[in-house]
Amino acid sequence: MLNETIAAIRPLDDEAVAAARALQARLTKPTGSLGALEALSVRLAGLAGACPPPIPEPAALAIFAGDHGVHEQGVTPWPQEVTAQMVANFVAGGAVVNAFARQAGVAVTVVDVGVKATLDPADGLLDRKVRAGTRDLSVEPAMTREETIRAIEVGMQVAEDLVAGGARALLTGDMGIANTTPSAALIAAFTHADPAAVTGLGTGIDSETHARKLAVVTSAVVGLRAEDPIDVLAAVGGFEQAALAGYILKAAALRVPVVLDGVIAAAAALAAHALSPLSAGAMVAGHRSAEPGATVALGYLELEPLVDLGLRLGEGTGAVLALPIVASAVRVLHEVATFDSAGVAHK
């Protein structure tokens, strides 16, 4: 599935891009007055190969959950049991992202791709566990290559199923106590940034914990000898980052926009980009996370975030909040009159 998906990813359609640019120039507004929304609408036309592109509704959010062996290094004060507890909260509809999703009309699917605990079956929860948590990346590779590919293909299958079920936009979500540590390591590895520039405070850790976290990230990146993107993911990543990378790649192959959430999604997007640079055409940066690694990753991917609200919750919250903006950018091409049709004088 991995090789077939990568082979299916194509460049943006030049004719659709040109048509969208020409249409934007004829709409009843000054050219460029919608700023980043105009560029986004043009890119989404190129992704779909049609002008105007489909309005990205309905949308589906997949929250990939996993635990991390590096938790043992004291990189977060939160107990590992919180991952499973929050998965139950998502399924029950009680998390922040559930409230946002209800407001935006977004369907939520939770995927256990690597939670350490055994979870009770529930509606809206998919058991796709590759392993009960990763190994400690500060001691050994977090995953084997085989496990990493399995996790990537979990994400691909979830994306394929959601699009087959009618989703016209995919949103990224994640849950995993300590998962900002592997995300920082991945971002440093893929962008060659200084670990200190990409290792943030996560859930709000103190300076002593941050120092431990930075030491772990620095050691992992300095000792990394892998160059193949899958081997990098295996060495310092997590099951949710691998699954999200597959989810993003499949969205690109299906020519469906994928709205990225925060730093975990940004790390996964770098892995997807390393496997297929063309996949960036499907990526929409929902927001600028307060985690510094997210800004570094988005800059590397040349993606401009739609909003900056100082968010650092994860779960998919920023992606859900950004969805109406994405839909509005596309709706302009569908519904706004041209100067000629409206009888409005052009300059």
Image (spheres, grey):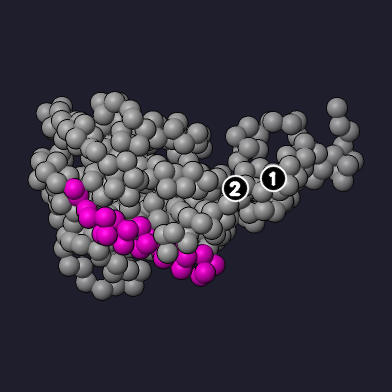
Q: What is the x, y in percent for residue 341?
A: 87, 46
Based on the displayed image, in which of its 4 quarters is residue 22 positioned?
A: top right
Identify the secondary structure beneath mark 1: helix
Circles 1 and 2, Cβ within 8 Å, touching? The answer is: yes
Say whether residue 159 is left or right of residue 141.
right
148 within the magenta span:
yes
Say whether residue 78 is left or right of residue 302.
left
The amino acid sitting under disc 1 is Asp
Q: What is the x, y in percent for residue 171?
A: 45, 53
Which SS does the magenta portion mostly show?
A: helix
The amino acid sitting under disc 2 is Pro
Point 63% across, 37% down: residue: 39
343 within the magenta span:
no
Say whether residue 294 is left or right of residue 219.
right
Q: Which mark is residue 11?
A: 2
Point 32% across, 68% down: residue: 126
Q: What is the x, y in percent for residue 170?
A: 48, 56
Identify the secondary structure beneath mark 2: loop
Magenta residues span 141-166
Residue 50 vertical placement versus 17 (above, below): below
Q: Where's the N terminus, which quadrant?
A: bottom left
- The residue carrying mark 1 is 14
Point 39% across, 51% down: residue: 245
Q: Residues within 10 Å of mark 1 (few under 14, many from 20)?
A: some
Residue 307 can be seen, yes or no: no
Residue 255 can be seen, yes or no: yes
For the residue pair 271 and 291, the one nearer the viewer reads as: 271
